[in-house]
Image: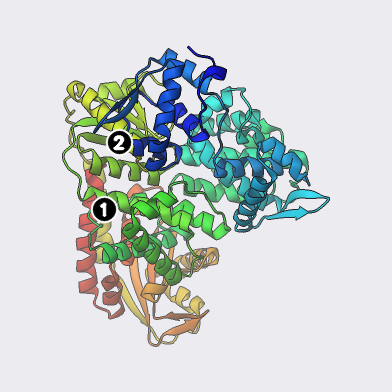
Amino acid sequence: MAQQSSLPLLTDNGRKLIRKLADLPSVWLTAAALGESVGVSRRTVMRELPGMEKWLKAAGFRLVRSPGQGMRLEEEEQRRAALRALVGGGVVLSKNERIDRLLTLLFAAGGPVKTQWLAERLDVSEHTLSGDLNAAADWLLARDVTLMRRAGVGVWLEGTPESLRRAMGVRLRPQLTQMDWQQFLESRQGGTTLDLLDRQDMQTVARVLQGFERRGRFVFSDSAFVALVLHLTLLAGQVRSGTLSAEGPRDTAGRDAAALLLSVEGTLGVRLPAGEAAYLERYLQAATGEQDWDDPQQLQVSQLAALLIQGMERETGVTLTGFSTFRADLCAHLRPMLLRITRGERIENPQLDAVRTQYPALWDAVRLVCGEAARTLRLPPIPDEEAGFLAMHFGAVLEECEKARRRLRAVVVCPMGLATSRFLTSQLDREFPLIAVERMCPMRGLDTDALRREGIGLILSTVPLHVDFPHIVVSTVLQEKDRILLQNAIDSFQRQASAPVQAAPPTADLRYTGALSACVVDLLDTLAVREVSAPRSRRDLIRHAARLFCNTPAGARRVEDALVRREALGDTYIAPLRALLLHCKTDAVTGCRLGYLHPARPLAEDGHDIQGAIVMLAPDGPEPVWQQVMQQVSAVLIDRPELVRALHTGDCAQAAALLEAELGCRLQSGLTGR
C-alpha cells in the first residue's frame, strides 16, 4: 500500500467522496447518489472521478465502474478501515455543524470571548467565522437571544436564562435524537457539541424517568424522553452555575408532576426553579398523550385537529376521517405542539427543507390550512418547523391511499417522534411495496427476540443500532443511497421472509360493552334544550346550566361551583359554533348528560358573539365508560356542526338521531380495537 506522500494530489471533494465510498457498503452507487451523500452535484462527482480513480489505483485499492449501474469500491472491511485512515484529513463540518459548535462555545463561556479564539477552536478563517456569526445571530434572534459583538471586547450571548436554555435545547435535541444517545452517555469520547451536557446528570435524570415509567402509567416516546432529559440537565447546570435562581414558592401541581420533581431534585442534589412543577405538569400531559374530556386544553386540541382535518380534506380532495387512528395520532402530536407555541418555544425540524422541495403541493396545503386554523382559534402563528411535522402526519395518511401489497415484514425505529416515523413509513409504502412495515418501535428496550417470534425480518432505523438483528440505517426523507440499500435488502431478505402471522381477532369485554351502551342510551334519553330569557353574563348562563340536570338546590350549587372553577382555567368559547362549552365532572349527576341553553337574544361578552351554551356533565368517578362517551361526544360536537344547529333550533329528535348514529359508529370502532 502506497504512502500518503507518494500518492497523486487529491482535491477536498475527491477526499470526501473516497471517504464516503469507504463508509458505505459494497453496493452499486450512481454518481448522483454518491454526490447527494456528501452534498455535491452529480457533475462534481463526474469531474472528480478520474482523479479519484488515479489516486485509489496508486494507493492499491479497487474502484469498479459499470455503465448503467454506477461505481463500487470492492474491498473488505479491514481494507476499508485502512483506506479511511489513509484518506484522513479530519472531519469536514457543514455550516450547520459549525454553528452548532459556535453556539455551544458561546453558551459554555457565559461571557465575552475573542473572535480569534473562536476561529481557532472551530478551525476556520475569520472570514468564515464572520458569516457563521451572522447566520447564528439571525437564528438566535427568533428565539429571544441576542448575539452581541463589540470590538475590543469580543462575542457573547444575551438573554434570559430560560431563553438561553431553550435555544441550546433546540440545537442539541436533534443531535441526541439522531444517535444512540445511551451509548453516548456511556462513552467518554469528547470533541462534540454535546460535551456541553453533564453526562452524569443526564444518566441520573434518565434513571429517574425510567423508574417513573416502571412505577406509573406513563410511557414516554423516545423523543419526549430525550427532550425531558435535556431540559432537566441544562436546567440543573444553570442552577449550579448561579445563572438561574431556584428561590420562590412552588406552584401547585398534580401528584405525578410533584413526585417526579422531588425525585429529580433528590438525585441531582439541586433545588430546581419554582415554576418547574407547573411546567412538568403540562409536559407530562402533553408528552404522554393523556386525554380527558374536561381537560381545559383538550377542547382546544380537538378544535384544532378538526379544523386541520377539514382543511386538508378540502385542499386535497381526500377523505381523511376514515383512518381510524389518524385523529388520535394527530391529537397526540398537537398537545405538545400547542404547549410549545403558547410558550414561544421553537424546535428544529431537520427535514423541513426536504418536505418543502420534495412535496411542494403537500407543503402549500398544510401551510395554508395551519394559517386558517390559527386565525380561527386565535392562536399564535404556527411556525414552519411545526407545520413541517404536520405535513408529515398528513403526508403519511395521503400516502396510505396509494399503498400496494407488501411482503417483507419490517418495523421502523425513529427516535425523532411519531410524525417522522409515520412519514418514513409512508415513503416506504409508496416506493417499496415489497416491504410491509408492521409498526413503529421505540429504540429504548428494543426486543429482538420478540421481533423474531413475530416473524419480523428487518429493522429500518434512522439512527445507528447495536443489535444482533438484520437492520438498515436510512434517512427520514429517503435519499438515493437509502433506496439502493433498501432494494439490496429486499433482494437478500425476500427468500427468508416469514409467512404472515394471523393474529386472533380482538374481542370486546361484554360487560364493558353493556355499560357503554347503557351510558349512551341514558345520555340520549336525558338530552335537554332550554331557552334562557335574557342572560346578562356568562355567570347567568352558568347558573342556568347548573339547574339543567339538578332538581335540588344543593346539587345545583355543586355543579355551579364546578363550572365556575372550570371557567377560570381557560376560555370555553368555541368560535366556529358561537357557543360556550360549559362542562365539568360532578357528583351531582349519576350519568353522562348533554344539554343546550338557547338565549332569547345573543350575549356579547369579551368580544365573543355567544348564541348558546353547550352543557356537558359526567359523574366524578373512575368509571372508564364515562370518559370514553364524553370524549366522543366532544368530538362529534366539533366535527358535526349540524348537531349544534339542531340543538340551537330546539330539535331534540334530530339532535338525538344524529348523535346516536355518530356515537354508534365511533364507539364500535373503539370496541374493535379494545
Residue in the foreground of this view, choosing between 56 and 325: 56
Dot 2 crowding, Cα within 10 Å, few <14, some 14–19, many 20+? some
User: Real-space Cα distance between discs 2 and 1?
Assistant: 21 Å
Label tally: 2
Does the CB distance between marks 2 and 1 fall below 8 Å? no
Q: Is residue 375 left or right of residue 496?
A: right
Dot 1 crowding, Cα within 10 Å, few <14, some 14–19, many 20+? some
**Picture residue at 35% right of the left edge, 35% below the top:** 481
Q: Is residue 119 left or right of residue 552?
A: right
Q: Is residue 652 above or below residue 203?
A: below
**Picture residue at 50% right of the left edge, 80% below the top:** 607
Q: Position of residue 573 (x, y in %)?
A: 45, 72
Please name the amino acid that badge 1 sits on. Leu
Residue in the foreground of this view, choosing between 266 and 255: 266
Q: Position of residue 271 (x, y in %)?
A: 71, 40
Please name the amino acid that badge 2 sits on. Arg
The answer to which quarter of the image holds residue 387 is: bottom left
Who comes first in sequence, dot 2 or dot 1? 1
Residue in the foreground of this view, choosing between 129 and 104: 129
Q: Identify the residue position indicated by label 1 in the image.
A: 398
Q: Is residue 226 left or right of residue 105?
A: left
Q: Position of residue 612 (x, y in %)?
A: 38, 78
Q: Is residue 397 above or below residue 586?
A: above
Q: Quadrant of the C terminus?
A: top left
